[in-house]
Image: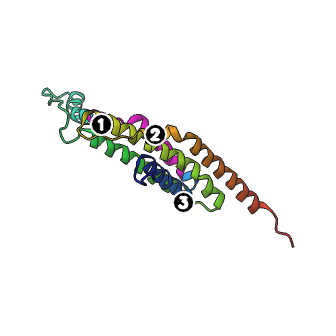
């Protein structure tokens, strides 16, 4: 018997959470979030916080150059931003920003089909976030003393299941939309 907190169990709990969020928020809001999740997964990696700290450390030297000052401050990276934890914080901040902007731009979903279609981007978002976190943890476990076995929780192994859930959500949304449009018989 498999534990609920094994690799696949945690994966399906995470996917279920994103599916529920997608249903609650609707497809419009969830598409905005999906864009931010895609950007975060592409732009943020384990060394991102080091790049950000280097960029922030070079701002004073750049400003002094632009202002024509004769003495230039050193362009040392900031010591308080760096490491894998800060990269995860940046990744999470981009995702939270996407959810916030999605909530501000679009109203709450008014109809059930809107909510049901929201399952699809929620499902994709969940798979991307969990795949990113899996890769991030595996990259970090190579350099740390902590070891994780996440090979069985690979989102790529569950693409057929995710595809079937997405198709079922579309079929249910179409049925719900047609039932709503049907004229009432007297």
- Please name the residue that numbered disc 3 is placed on: 24
- Please name the residue that numbered disc 1 is placed on: 140
State whether residue 70 is above or below residue 168. above
- Please name the residue that numbered disc 2 is placed on: 154
Mark 1 vs mark 3: in front:
1
Res. 31 visible in picture: no
Q: Position of residue 99 (x, y in %)?
A: 46, 52
Main secondary structure of the magenta stretch: helix
> Could you classify mark 2 by the number of other residues whose Cα lies within 10 Å: few (under 14), some (14-19), or many (20 or more)?
some
Q: Position of residue 184 (x, y in %)?
A: 82, 68
Mark 3 vs mark 2: in front:
2
Circles 1 and 3 in contact, beta carbons < 8 Å:
no
Q: Quadrant of residue 86?
A: top left
**Helix, strand or loop at mark 2:** loop
**In the image, farthest residue toward the bottom:** 186
Which is more N-terminal, label 3 or label 1? 3
Q: Position of residue 53 (x, y in %)?
A: 24, 36
């Amino acid at each position: 018997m498999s534990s609920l907190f094994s690799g696949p169990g945690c994966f399906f709990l995470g996917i279920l959470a994103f599916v529920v969020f997608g249903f609650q928020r609707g497809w419009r809001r969830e598409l905005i979030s999906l864009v931010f999740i895609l950007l975060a997964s592409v732009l943020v990696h384990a060394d991102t916080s080091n790049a950000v700290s280097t960029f922030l450390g070079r701002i004073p030297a750049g400003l002094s150059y632009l202002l024509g000052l004769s003495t230039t401050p050193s362009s040392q990276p900031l010591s308080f931003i760096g490491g894998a934890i800060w990269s995860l914080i940046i990744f999470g901040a981009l995702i939270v920003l996407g959810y916030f902007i999605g909530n501000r731009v679009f109203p709450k979903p008014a109809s059930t089909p809107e909510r049901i279609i929201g399952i699809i981007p929620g499902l994709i978002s969940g798979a991307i976030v969990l795949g990113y976190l899996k890769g991030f943890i595996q990259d970090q476990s190579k350099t740390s003393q902590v070891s994780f076995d996440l090979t069985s929780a690979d989102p790529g192994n569950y693409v057929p299941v995710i595809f079937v859930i997405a198709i079922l959500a579309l079929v249910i949304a179409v049925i719900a939309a047609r039932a709503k449009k049907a004229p009432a018989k007297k």
